[in-house]
Image (cartoon, rainbow, N blue to C red):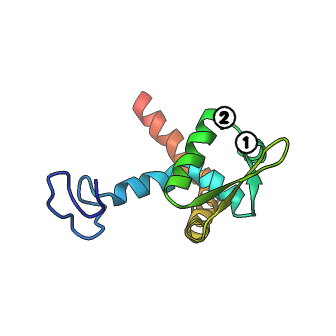
Amino acid sequence: MRLGTRPDGTPYPEGDPYVDGCPTRHILDRIGDRWTVLVVGVLSGGTARFSELRRRVEGISQKMLTQTLRELERDGLVTRTVHAEVPVRVEYALTDAGRTLTGPLKALEEWSVQHLSGVLAARETYDDRRTA
């Protein structure tokens, strides 16, 4: 599918994520994914190897980290550099576009920390009402 064109060939309104099938939804899915938020957060501190990313992002499986890095690379947000050494060394870094995400994603991270107790209290109240 080409950017800006529906499968039937008619154009999308320019970058309107509220229109079903608009390619911007794919971008929102990518940057809104929890693993993306955490991987970009680690890479905002500079280049990292796969093993470092896996160690810093607790709970992510090798498969999910590989998938997340490939999708971020495909979307032009991360670069993968292979150094021809023995053993081979692979490093990941944010691209210029990826670095523009660090501010908004850091704001989401900070919001989640600041509002954690309120969200947990709201969940408890909701769950109590549902079970009563």
Q: Residues within 10 Å of mark 2 (few under 14, many from 20)?
A: few
Give the x, y percent position of residue 68.
57, 45
Q: Earlier in the sequence, mark 2 or mark 1?
A: 1
The image quadrant of residue 60 is: top right
The answer to whether one can see residue 106 in this image is: yes
Expressed as whole percent of the image width and height from the top left, the position of residue 4 reads 26, 64
Q: Position of residue 108 (x, y in %)?
A: 57, 61
Residue at image position (55%, 50%) is 119
Q: Nearer the viewer, residue 33 or 93?
A: 93
Q: Determine which residue is flagged by label 2.
A: 62
- Which residue, as the protein is rendered here, is positioned at the far right? 86
Residue sitting at 60 percent across and 58 percent down? Answer: 78
Foreground of the two, 60 or 23: 23
Find residue 54 and name its label. Answer: 1
- Residue 61 seen in the current view: no
Secondary element type, mark 1: helix
**Image side of residue 23 versus residue 36, left or right:** left
